[in-house]
Image: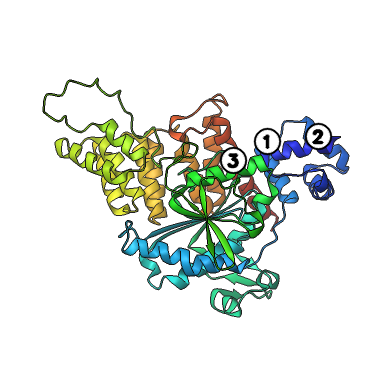
Amino acid sequence: MHYKKLSELISLRTGLNFSQAKWDDLKKGLQRAQGDFGFQDVDAFISWLVSSPITAEDIERLACHITIGETYFFREKSSLEALQNHIFPQIIQAQKTGNRAGNRAIRVWSAGCSTGEEAYTIAIILKKLLPDIQTWMLSISATDINPLFIKKAIDGIYTQWSFRNTPDWVKTECFTLTPEGKFAIRSEFKRMLSFSTLNLAEDTYPSVNNNTHDIDVILCRNVLMYFSREEAIKVTRRFYKTLVNGGWLIVSHTEHSNKLFEGFEAVAFPDAIIYRKKPLNTEILTNTPLIPHWVVKTTPASHKKEDTGFHPLPQFPEALLKYEGGSYDEAEEILLRLLAINKGEARSLVLLARVYANKGMLDKALEHCQMAIEADNLNPGYHYLAATILEERGQVQEAMEALGKAIYVDQAYVLAHFAMGNLSLRQRRYSESHRHFSNALKILASYNPEDVLPESEGIPVDRLREMIEASMAYVKITLSEEVIT
């Protein structure tokens, strides 16, 4: 039976679980998709899917038809009330007076965002909570496997159906009425978000490449229920790595499971249970460091010498070890001592920049990254790091200039082309985005699929290629629609 083989293929590539009980739903989705692939018979379409090499772009196109975007603003109010009345206020207070004082940075990820209602809801809540919002560095990332959903989310135009069970003030204060009688999200909320395609079944997060790192709150509601249990466990473990210590994971009330959220603690709020990442005390789940391993190259530590009563000078590998363990204060102390000895030592400067970035001190992070560039202007990785920090600060144009410098130093620098494509996409410069993605794919063509680029944080070339192809799929859809209109 081809449905069994196809459902296994879809589960492998997307994580979506189409058991035999859901084959009727799968068939309806395939019937919607068959014309897009040039087929008029669903059985012939299924035979082609299970017998042909399926590209990442094919998977994205298929996902457009077999995934359901059923959502609306302020959906599942109990968890949103816990977020608005308890979790966000705790994070804000910690930024002001706690161990994160002075950071004034909040990072949120809507994973499986569908057509964007949830992500915009978060932006509306944060704007309500932060009267001085312009002084905060907010990052609200929203991703979905379906590029058509992402396109609608970026457009930000909704019908009355998206406001069912939504307070009336949301429409009047946060949207403008279009001539067609629809509702367009106001620009101040649009600027708070970034949308992109991402397949949760792929091992591409946490990563600085897609802005899925050091997240305070992840919302993944009514998504895990579509995954097989094994795949859902893999996803939640990657979520664990993505969150900061004490970070929060919000799922639907129908998705609660002690086994599924191993490593988290369940916290009870009025009418809601939300999962919080425990401190690092498990051997199974560990934080992924923000710093790309290629930025700092270490040499083997020297052999221990007999204690003569003198303490040795601090060693760079020690600082790197502290950093990778999340002990940023200790890493900072060691690096400052090293730089007091050698002020222009580039690798210490760049690691210190990453320390400050992880502590939310982006001004200091950028300052030390620029010092590293002055020490070694021909290192493309330092320019790429500067671009990452600038993007975090909301300085998109400056980030693109830094990426341009990385490419000038090394024309074959894949991640810079990829990042330029993503930034251009966010600015709706689709032709430019397509060009950068194409350049990245051309460069990757010289690598073997199983190769791992040192600057890609361990992501194999074939996975990186699929990430780029997924982004290109959305760009191609948009460009084709522009030609039609």
Q: SS class of the residue under badge 3?
A: helix
Q: SS class of the residue under badge 1?
A: loop
Q: Position of residue 339 (x, y in %)?
A: 19, 39
Labels 3 & 1 near each other (Cβ < 8 A) = no
Q: Nearer the viewer, mark 2 or mark 3?
A: 3
**Amino acid tagged 2:** Trp
- Between residues 277 and 54, which one lies in front from this camera angle? 277
Labels 1 & 2 near each other (Cβ < 8 A) = no
Number of residues whose C-alpha sits closer than 10 Å to that of mark 1, classed few (under 14), some (14–19) or many (20 or more):
few
Q: Nearer the viewer, mark 3 or mark 1?
A: 3
Taking 52 as reference, is 371 above or below it?
below
**How many numbered marks appear?**
3
Asked if residue 42 can be seen in this view, the reply is yes
Q: Residue 55, labelled with which disc?
A: 1
Sequence order check, earlier mark of 3 and 1: 1
Labels 2 & 3 near each other (Cβ < 8 A) = no
